[in-house]
Amino acid sequence: MNKTRNYQLNQWELHDRVMMQDFNADNAKIDAALKAEADARAAADAAIKAEFAKFGNCRVEAFTYTGTGIKGTEQTRRIAFAARPVWMVIMGGGNILWASGMTERQLFLGRYAGVNNQLTLTNTDLKWEGNTAVLGSADPATRMDSSGTYGVIALFAEDAK
């Protein structure tokens, strides 16, 4: 009688005598292999869940606002959040701003012009008043306040409450 390569299960040929104990032995091998696989998957799932638990919980908030387009040194753009975000991204007017609620400095504010393949980085004043980001600049584009619609995505650490 031949055996399978991986689990040594019986492979009967025409002249072999079929025996009940051969079937039972094969079923025991299959049962043990399936149980080992299920245990390994459960252990892997538990390890993955434990790793993800280290990162805490995250909540995402997304919304839009309309820029004013008003120029002037006294102008600010105020963006209120439900809580102070860990990260925020504001996109619109051809610009993108990345910033953290943990600091009063932007991490990136730039414009990418696809026509001439230039990336221009600029600065703006970022201050936090509670859960409100206050962007200040005489240039509406730099304070993310040109005419048009802006999209905001904010990430919050829910386990930090």
Image: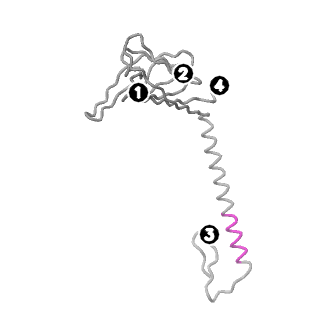
Label 3, label 4: how far apart the Cα atoms are: 53 Å
The stretch in magenta equals 22-33
Q: Nearer the viewer, residue 65 or 137?
A: 65
The mark lying in front, picked from 3 and 1, is 1
The residue beneath circle 2 is 80
Question: In the rendered structure, which disc, 1 or 2, sits on the residue that comes first in sequence?
Answer: 2
In the displayed structure image, the side of residue 109 where residue 153 appears, left or right: right
- For badge 1, the amino acid type reads Gly
- For badge 3, the amino acid type reads Tyr
- Return the x and y of residue 144 as percentages of the image width and height: 41, 23
The residue beneath circle 3 is 7
Label at residue 148: 1
Question: Is the residue under label 4 in contact with that under label 2 (CB below 8 Å)?
Answer: no
The mark lying in front, picked from 2 and 4, is 2
Question: Is the residue under label 4 in contact with that under label 3 (CB below 8 Å)?
Answer: no
In the displayed structure image, the side of residue 50 where residue 92 appears, left or right: left
Please identify the dominant SS of the magenta region. Answer: helix
The mark lying in front, picked from 1 and 4, is 1
